[in-house]
Amino acid sequence: MRFGEFGGRFVPEVLIPPLEELEKAYAKLKDDEEFKRELDYYLRNYAGRPTPLYFARNLSKELGMRVYLKREDLLHGGAHKINNTLAQALLAKFMGKTRVIAETGAGQHGVATAMACALLGISCRIYMGALDYERQKMNVFRMKILGAEVVAVESGSKTLKDAINEALRDWAESFETTHYLIGSVVGPHPFPTIVRDFQAVIGKEARKQILEIEGSLPDAIVACVGGGSNAIGIFYPFLNDDLRLIGVEAGGLGIETGKHSASLYAGRKGVLHGMRSYFLQDEDGMILDTHSISAGLDYPGVGPEHAFLKDSGRVEYTFVTDREALNAFLKLSKLEGIIPALESAHALAYLEKDEELKGSTVIVNLSGRGDKDLGIVMEAMK
Amino acid sequence: MISKSLIVFFPAGYPSKEKTLDFMLSANADMIELGIPFSDPVADGATIQKAYYEALSSGFKVKDVFWIAREFRKRDSRKLVLMSYFNPIHSAGMREFVEKAYESGFDAILVVDLPFDEAKEFVGICRDVGIKNVFLAAPNTSEERLAKIDELSEFVYLVSTYGVTGAREKISKLAFEALKRAKRTCRKPIAVGFGVSKREHVVELFNAGADGVVVGSALVELIKKFGERAKEEIAKFTSELKA
């Protein structure tokens, strides 16, 4: 239920029974052979697993280190999100739920949820902050084509955190028929554990692949951190190994400007969305508005397991700015012919900032592809 | 603490701390609940969300809620319950916050997103300081949890339905079933809230055995509609509810 002092279940009483129901269902299902077979089938044949671990030769030469990319960008939908949505949608079916709700920021998790729901014949409603709804019109349209209902949330700052608030409000009313398919390793217990377990497939594959290719573990693994699902997914199977794990948050316009989303780097301990973790908040405990060029990292909190891994010192957390991420976005596109998501570009950008990485072997989690970001990048390059 | 009591809820600082104090003093109610505006009120419906948002936008600070309580206490001896989300309390430091709440005249604290399993330290501090706890119960709360909530609470705040705060046309059937069950299990008084907005709701719930009813969003709607002049409307409306 907890990761040290973090995590927990800080929700209104009405949500305790549905969380207990979910916890029980998951405990029963996670080792169920039939469930595992079915999930594995869809991950292989529908989503496109396993994803390659690709040695980026040109980038390696440029940076003076051996860089491997875990190609989650090649998955159906263009990001790692589908690992979790397929699994949770199957879980919802197992629980007899006929309806799924989810939150989305940029729309990637919303799209991945809509896909899984279309596939499994579950009705689907996606909450999206009204500002994101405007900014990400194409993804809204994509979700609608996939059969989802998309609701623009007009309350609060009209972004991802407000979409989560609204999904929680819906769930407090609809839990009897509805599963809340949360998109990252955030929220009340057992969500951070469930999502981590379903994303850990990334790290399990990467571990096997690097041992096959290199014959040894890498020196470091780098991943971007918003809520933190792709990062925990690749870190988790390496936690007990002797190597560096580096999480890169969104530094936005610079930490000193206050316009960023680096909750581990610059936040304080707090409680929101059912969990105790690090949050960007004012002196009264009001949650602050955040900024990042990457909508997927634009969240004022972070998963509780990351908070724990920060305090324990096992994972190093750092940040790069919008500008640095943008440069990395362009560099990978040019050198390797791979357009990364702006989220993943944060992880790539860090490689150039750490002298210690020179000469070493590094895996970067390329959590998504960048097609969705072309409009934003076009604006930013003006 | 309650017996056939009308409990009214006001969002602190909406539209200003002075007005909130005025509204509290003029409400014809037995107990007053004062809510600390929060940036992310997940248990609240649109009406209270907007009130909180406006209060924060016009500069409300958590310390204002203590000011309101102190001023109220100078003039009024009715019981005062502080309602908050957990983060403002966590942020201030639990002990510091609870001491301030006690010193400024609050009798009890209800933390919306702090179920009792997460509240061990908090309850300990409240006991030390001498302020009472109120916990939420819901129609889907198990007997086992209900008993624990009863044990820790000064009175049990029973949520009438699934979902969030907000005026509703009717009191749901769930409320009456839950009330019956809670009356059987609990030794403490039961107040029913969420969706209670009309005189007939109040009567129905009292008849069904409720020891208190909480009216919130309906009052916030009045404030929204009448603004500065809401004071008289609140006095009138609460008198009707109580009649």
Image (cartoon, coloured by chain):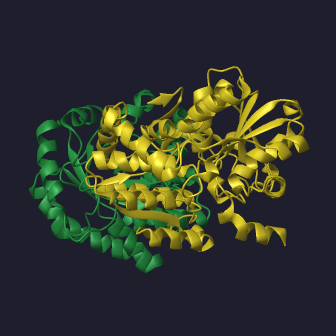
Chain colours: A yellow, B green
Q: Going 41% across and 61% down the picture, which residue do you hit?
A: B10
Where A19 falls versus A81 (above or below)? above
- Relative to B185, A86 lies left or right: right
Residue B109, quarter of the rendered image: top left
Decide if residue A228 is in sight here.
Answer: no
Q: Is residue B214 above or below residue A312?
A: below
Residue at 22% from the left image edge and 52% from the top image edge: B212
Q: Quadrant of residue A200?
A: top right
Asked if residue A82 can be seen in this view, the reply is yes
Q: Report x, y in % for residue A43.
A: 47, 46
Q: Could you say which is closer to the camera, residue A40 or residue A260?
A: A40
Rendered view: A107 above or below B140: below
Which residue lies at the image location 41% right of the left edge and 33% below the top edge? B119
What is the quadrant of residue B235 in the picture?
bottom left
Q: Position of residue A315 (x, y in %)?
A: 68, 30
Question: Which quadrant would the N terminus of chain B be assigned to in this image?
Answer: top left
Residue A56 relative to residue A343: left or right: right
Can you give x and y, in whole percent of width and height, for residue B208 in the image?
Answer: 10, 55
